[in-house]
Image (cartoon, rainbow, N blue to C red):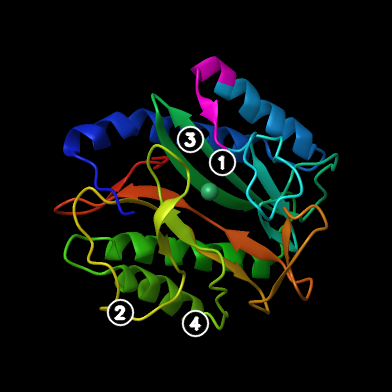
Amino acid sequence: MIELRTPTQIEQMRPAGRFVASVISALSEKAAVGVNLLELDELAHRMIKDAGATSCYIDYHPSFGAMPFGKVLCTSVNDAVLHGLPYDYMLQDGDLLSVDFAASVDGWVSDSALSVVVGNADPKDLQLIDTAQRALDAGIAAARSGNRLGDISFAIGSVAHEAGLKVNLQFGGHGVGRTMHGDPHVPNDGQAGRGLKLRPGLVIAIEPWFLHTTDEIRFDPDGWTIRSADGSRGAHVEHTVAITDGDAIVLTSRD
Ligand code: MG
């Protein structure tokens, strides 16, 4: 079911967005060669406690997960791109790390993700992150009242195709509200002018993620961590946005 939020409710969603943005910023500052993925999860956990927020991940147990997630943060390294379960791993020089974080504040959820390279970066990895970021910006620019959902998907997919990337349609953006995942599904490629008409009050997470040389994925045995089928690296960026009469409000903006 598609739910639209009133301007008052969108104002009430801002603290969650600000909090999630602050955690993503703190994680990107802390991520460095020699830092353990479990330390990043602990940092996010501490920030949740200090803010009186609620994790969307720790008890999350969809059908594809072998067990509840058990952590508050997704950390996906190199060929892992989505849903990476933090484990005892120390970041190495040149690792491409994607962090994805969602939490609830005052009963409203926000969801955001960012990719960074620690240490000396392969320029190709920086390019992949840049493409994902430009796709996110294009998707946000298309998230306007009067447009259709397909315009967002088309905008994201166009940036990917121009960069020579294939797009996986199995996982994409989603509605955000009282819970982390709601309708509509927001694919990372599609046809302009098609699909749901966008109206003020629609709040969605837009989250392009791309792999260097494939659109095929495989799952770790635990059902969580998603990797490229061919071992190539991936990048993932995400913002929660509210559609208005004008420009979308980027609730998880870090500016
Ligand atoms: Mg997310």
Figure check: 153 above or below 181? below
Residue 23 x, y percent position in the rendering: 54, 33
Residue type (three-letter) at the residue carrying disc 3? Val
Q: Residues within 10 Å of mark 4 (few under 14, many from 20)?
A: few
Q: Position of residue 125 (x, y in %)?
A: 66, 65
Q: Secondary structure at mark 1?
A: strand
Q: Which residue is mark 2?
A: 192
Which span of residues is magenta-colored? 49-56
Any part of residue 206 in sight: no
Q: Secondary structure at mark 3?
A: helix
Residue highlighted by disc 3: 20
User: Circle 2 sits in a helix, a strand or a loop, which is it?
Assistant: loop
- Circles 1 and 3, Cβ within 8 Å, touching? The answer is yes
For label 1, the residue is: 101
Q: Is mark 4 within 8 Å of ligand 1?
A: no
Q: Is mark 1 within 8 Å of ligand 1?
A: yes
Q: Earlier in the sequence, mark 2 or mark 1?
A: 1
- State the mark number for residue 161: 4
Q: Position of residue 77 (x, y in %)?
A: 74, 54
